[in-house]
Amino acid sequence: MRPDAFTALGLLALCPALVAAAPHESLHSDHYHQANTPTSHPPRSWRKLSDAIIQKVWHLENTQKTVTSDNAPIKGPSRDLLARYGNDIVLRFTITTADEASALAEAADTLFLDVWEFNSDWVDIRIAKDVVPSLLGLLPPSLQNAHVPLMQDLDLAQAIFSSLPSPSATQSDHDDHSSYSSHLTPPSRLKGKGHPFFQDYQPLSVINPWMSLMASMFTTHVRRISVGVTYEGREIPALRVGVHPTNREQTLLTRKTVLVTGGSHAREWISTSTVNYLAWTMINSYGKDREITRLLEQFDFVFVPTLNPDGYVYSWEVDRLWRKNRQPTSLRFCKGVDLDRSYSFHWDGDSTSTNPCSESFPGDQAFDGVESRAFSEWAKNETDNGVEFVGFIDLHSYSQQILYPYSYTCDEEPPSIEDLEELAMGLGKAIRTSRKGHAYKVTSACEGNVAMAKNGKKKVFPRIESAGGSALDWFYHELGVKFSFQIKLRDTGSYGFLLPKDNIVPTGNEIIDALLYLGRFMMGEVGVMKGAPSVEEVVMMKKKEGGEKAGEGEEVQEEEEQIEL
Ligand SMILES: [Zn+2]
């Protein structure tokens, strides 16, 4: 750790061990595995992927055994991994009063703690063990014992190690496979045996060529596009999936498009893998699955697996728990802007901590974040070129919540609150009734971003962190995307950001069901839009936009769902 950084933080007096809890600076790379570096993964994963696709395209039997690594199995985290995370734990504090929430928010801010997640009941904080006494010293007596460590049976370094691809993993014995095709209906949907790509989280160096491969293999309905360039000069890659009508009359229509994004926060790997899973499902089901085929004929879907490629790469190569992007700030040793606080709608950098060392540093001004600026400009440009964004699904982790606008405040209700609530409930139900689907809570993003009392009244507690400048609010309000949601994926805290990879496929499955529900909703088959005009009448509908809200939905749930622990 760097003394100069520490001094500049002005926190030395507080606690000498504090720096261990401060955001990590790049020390060196290549440290997750002792015997096998991340850079040795791509060729193997890539080969498995191409084999699987080639077999599928040519209808070959999958008789070939999975390629196995020549390297010896790796049993545990490397020394570097232990050095970086070995002293850290994640504590869950149970919150019952506004005073407690306030004290915890203040202490987390003072000590620059890494707040992993929070909701109405609890706050998860990652902290160096040595710093725990300092934290407790800042908290009221009621919180002294109101905390438990997460991942009890697994320390942080081990959990990180377990979330990395296993070099010797084989696909054939993965238990999701057997249930995978049998659970998908109709049977033609995704009948592929095994999906090597989704048995592990994948680094950008595999995701990028995978996307190119999708575009080159499915030329009828997939295009690889770029939605911007990062601070470090990487492309922000995306797949546009949809079947454009050739009928001249229809080409005059604006193209209704659904945006699905992930990876704004680098360490939320499940969001990146889920976007890829959704893309793959839609791509591969075109022409086989009636519902998906119809959806792709009427809508484009743009899948952006990581809005923060620099951060994602950094989370693979240096710090698994990195959250922000990688651009420099006014403090040399605290890089990175929180991209999901950087959008211009109610950007509130002035009213919250503007310390670049904060994990939710919003930048020095709105759209300081290179990637959020680039992405928003791309989106605006698209709308100028005949694209109408009708849906925005921004995937994050963790806590299993479906959040609708607004994020920045609970005092203002969005104009289309009824549609948003109804659709969110429908998405929640689609997920819960999905095969092996989990329960997701439905709430407004502002409530998801503050700790709240649960005694029946909507008593808003002080914010744990700022919630302005979100992509959710910007797309909803500034770009007018009617159906905008942020979904926080699995889990509810057992592993947090270090969700084991055997969740990749089940999480993908439950979210594809949500996406298909959104499709049915947009096509007027469920919910308030039931009975809406067909695509041929879209032009007429546009002229009357706003006048279609009638009738009651049929999928509304009465109460919020309980989180499943
Ligand atoms: Zn996030």
Image (tube, rainbow, N blue to C red):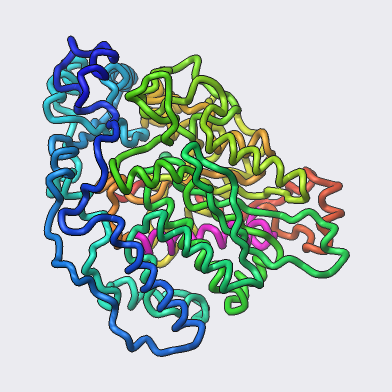
Horizontal relation, residue 166 to residue 483: left or right: left
Q: Say which of 529 and 39 sits in front.
A: 39
Residue 362 picture location, percent across and down: 47, 25
Which region of the structure is painted magenta?
504-527
Q: Is residue 118 left or right of residue 230?
A: left
Foreground residue among 493 and 228: 228
Is residue 459 at all visible to an observer of this figure? no
- Where residue 327 sits: x, y (%)? 44, 31
User: Is residue 539 in view from this perspective?
Assistant: yes
Whether 489 is drawn above or below 119: the answer is below
Displayed quadrant of residue 478: top right
> Residue at coordinates 27% horizontally, 19% vertically from top-left?
5
Q: Quadrant of ligand 1?
A: top left
Query: Which residue appears at 54% of the width and 73% of the height?
Result: 284
Instruction: Based on the picture, tell me whether residue 508 belongs to the magenta stretch.
Output: yes
Q: 5 above or below 287?
A: above
How many numbered tags mark residues here?
0
Residue 505 falls inside the magenta stretch: yes
Looking at the image, residue 279 sits to the left or right of residue 207; the answer is right
Please report the residue visible at 40 percent of the width from the left and 41 percent of the height from the top: 311
Magenta: main secondary structure equals helix
Would you place residue 129 above or below residue 12 in this image? below
Q: Position of residue 565 (x, y in %)?
A: 27, 49
Q: Is residue 273 above or below residue 468?
A: below
Identify the image quadrant of residue 89: top left
Residue 176's x, y, as percent? 32, 71
The residue at 37%/19% (across/down) is 331
What is the quadrant of residue 413 in the picture?
top right
Depth check: give the residue in front, 337 or 96. Answer: 337
